[in-house]
Image (tube, grey):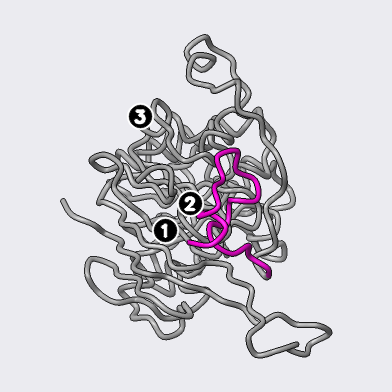
Amino acid sequence: MGEILTVRNLKKYFPVNDRGVIRRKHDKLKAVDNISFGLEEGECLGLVGESGSGKSTTAYMVVGMYAPTEGEILLRGQDISKVTAKRSKSVKREIAIVFQDPGTSLNPGQSIRQILTVPLRVHGVVERNRYRDKIEELLSLVELPPEYMYKQPRSIGGGERQMVAVARALAANPSLIVLDEPTSALDVSVQAKVITKLMEFQRSLGLSYLFITHDLSLMRNVATRIAIMYLGQIEELAPAKEFFENPVHPYTQMLLSSIPVVTQAEEEIRRQEIQSSGEIPSPVNVPPGCGFQTRCRHAMDECAVVDPEMVEYSPGHFVRCHICR
C-alpha cells in the first residue's frame, strides 16, 4: 500500500538556556539528530528508547507541535514539515495524537461532551445538530456509556479518561495516530484493556500508528516494526519478529536483557549475559563518534572517533554500529 509517513534526515536542536540567556551560539541540545524512517499504511511502528532519547520530540514534530530544525516529514508524499498552525486543514484532520497522561491532556474544566465537540466542530465532521449522536457513537466505540458525556474528566477513572482521549483522537476520522506512551500513566490493571482497544481500532478502522514507548516488552505483540532510539538517533530498526529473535546492536541487546520475563519463550529470547550499565549522556554534551560508545562492551578506538552510518544488515533490518558492517 505504500508509506503514509516518511521522515527524512530529521533534526531538532534546541538552544541551551541559562536563566533565559543562550550561553553560546553553538550550544545546542540535539533532541533529534538526523533520523530517517517510513511508516507503512496500516502498520504500527514502535519508536522505543530511554528518557531523553528523542522519541517524544520526534512525535511532536510529526503532529506539528514542533517545527524541524532540518529535514522533511511527508504525509503520503506531501511535505508537512511545518507547525500545526501552518498546516492545511486536511493534514490536521489526518493526524491525531493520544498523550501520555489524560489527567493533563483533557481540559478539567470541560465536560466530556465539550471535549469531544471540539474536533467535530473544528474539522466539520458532522453537522451541528448531529454532535450529540456522534459523541454517543464515539463513546460507544471506546465502551463508555452515553451518560459519560455529562461528566468531567476528574470524575472518572484513569483508564476511562484515556479512552476519552482515544475517542477525541478518533473523532476526526484520522489515518495516522501518534500514541505517546498511552498507557504508562495508567494502573497495570487497565493498561491491557486500553492496548487491546487500540489494536482493535487499528484493524477495524485501518489506522496507522506511530507508537512511542520505553516499554520494549509491550512492543512484542503490538508493533509491526520496532526502531530503537538513543541520543536522538535511531540505532536499530527491524520487523518485530526479527528484532526480538536477532537483535544486533549492543544497545538493543542490553535493553532486551533487562526485560522482565514471564514465559519460557521470553526466557529463551532474553540475553542474560548482557548487563545494563551506565546512564544515557546529556544530549547537550554528546560523546564524539558513536554516542553509545561510553556504555558499549564492544567499543573500539574507531567508535570514539567515527559516528557510524546506518546500514542494512539484512533485508529490512537496519543497524548503526561499526561491528555490524
Q: Cα distance, mark 3 to mark 1?
A: 33 Å
Horizontal and vertical percent for residue 201? Answer: 37, 41
For marks 3 and 2, the one nearer the N-term is 2
Res 126 seen here:
no
Q: Is residue 11 above or below residue 296?
A: below
Q: In which quarter of the image is residue 255?
A: top right
Q: Which amino acid does label 2 sit on?
A: Ala
For marks 3 and 1, the one nearer the N-term is 1
Query: Would you say the residues marked 3 and 2 are in contact, meaning their CB atoms lie under 8 Å apart?
Result: no
| Residue density around tag 1, few if under 14, some if 14–19, many if 20 or more, within 10 Å | many
Q: Which amino acid does label 1 sit on?
A: Ala
Residue carrying label 1: 171
Q: Helix or strand or loop: what does disc 1 sit on?
A: loop
Residue carrying label 3: 241
Q: Which mark is nearer the camera, 3 or 2?
A: 3
- What residue sits 26% from the left and 51% below the top? 40
Residue carrying label 2: 167
Q: Cα distance, mark 2 to mark 1?
A: 6 Å
Query: Would you say the residues marked 2 and 1 are in contact, meaning their CB atoms lie under 8 Å apart?
Result: yes
Residue stretch rendered in magenta on the structure = 285-306
Query: Would you say the residues marked 3 and 1 are in contact, meaning their CB atoms lie under 8 Å apart?
Result: no
